[in-house]
Amino acid sequence: MFAFLRPLIIFLLAALCEISGAYLIWLWRRDGRPMWLTLLGAALLFLYGVVQTAQSFGFGRAFAAYGGVFIMTAALWGWWVDGRTPDRWDWVGIIICLFGAGIILWGPRR
C-alpha cells in the first residue's frame, strides 16, 4: 500500500512547493508585496525541483503524471487561498486530468 501512496505524497509535496513558490512571486509582482517574498518563492521553487527527483520512475513519466496533480492542487489553492470556488467544469477537468495521471503512473506495462 505504501508503494501506491509514496508517489502521491511526493506529487502533493512537490505541488505545494511549486504553487506556493510561484504564488509568493505573484504577490510581489502583482500586488506590490515585499521583495523578500520573491526570494522565499524562489527557494520553494528550487525545493520543488528537488522533491520531484524523489520519484522512483523516469523523468518523463514523473512530470507527465505530475501535471494532473498540479492542476488539482492549483484549483484547490485558488479556492482556499484566493477564495475562487471551482465550478463544475473545473471539477470535470480535474477528474479527467487525475484519471490521465493515474493511467500514466499505474497503467499496465510490458
Image (spheres, rainbow, N blue to C red):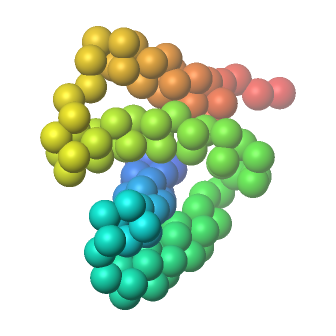
Image quadrant in which the N terminus is located: top left
Q: Position of residue 41 (x, y in %)?
A: 43, 74
**Count of numbered tags:** 0
Q: Looking at the image, is 49 positioned above or below residue 15?
A: below
Give the residue furthest to the right: 110
Does 54 sit left or right of 86 as displayed?
Answer: right
Q: Position of residue 33 (x, y in %)?
A: 29, 75
Does 74 sit left or right of 81 as displayed?
Answer: right
Q: Looking at the image, is 66 positioned above or below residue 13?
A: above
Residue 85: image quadrant is top left
Q: Residue at x 27, y 18 (%)?
A: 87
Q: Residue at x 83, y 27 (%)?
A: 110
Most foreground residue, 70 or 87: 87
Q: Position of residue 89 (x, y in %)?
A: 36, 12
Most foreground residue, 38 or 108: 38
Q: Is residue 3 visible?
A: no
Does 11 sit left or right of 78 as displayed?
Answer: right
